[in-house]
Image: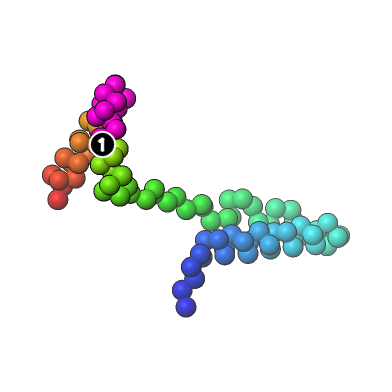
Amino acid sequence: MRQSHPHRTRTSRLLILRRLLEDLAANGHPLPPDRIRRQDLPPQPRYLPRPLSPEDDALLQQELRRTDDLPANALLLTRQWVARILILRA
């Protein structure tokens, strides 16, 4: 059976274990400090944003053309440049 959120599960279990060890140490049990450090936790996943729908993309293009200022034109140029690179790579 595949876990749906293995990162969250592992992080959660490590945090619970760290809290247990801290509680044991606070109650007088001889445990070295910092048995589970922040570096031991798995890194947070980095998700890419969801792509725009074709309708939203067309609306964005239309609004950028209508705005016709430097930032809008820079975005239009960048989008066309990236599209061209993707076509050449295919």
Q: Magenta residues?
A: 62-74
Write the residue at 52% across / 61% down.
7
The number of callouts visible is 1
Residue 17 image offset from top left, x and y in percent? 68, 63
Q: Camera-side residue: 83 or 44?
A: 83
Residue 77 image offset from top left, x and y in percent? 22, 30
Is residue 74 visible in the rendered structure shown here?
no
Residue under circle 1? 61
Q: Amino acid at mark 1?
A: Gln
Q: Camera-side residue: 82 or 13?
A: 82
Write the residue at 59% across / 59% down.
11
Write the residue at 51% across / 52% down.
44
Residue 69 lies within the magenta run: yes
Residue 38 lies within the magenta run: no
Residue 8 lies in quadrant: bottom right
* Relative to 69, residue 59 above or below: below
Residue lying at the far bottom of the rendered structure:
1
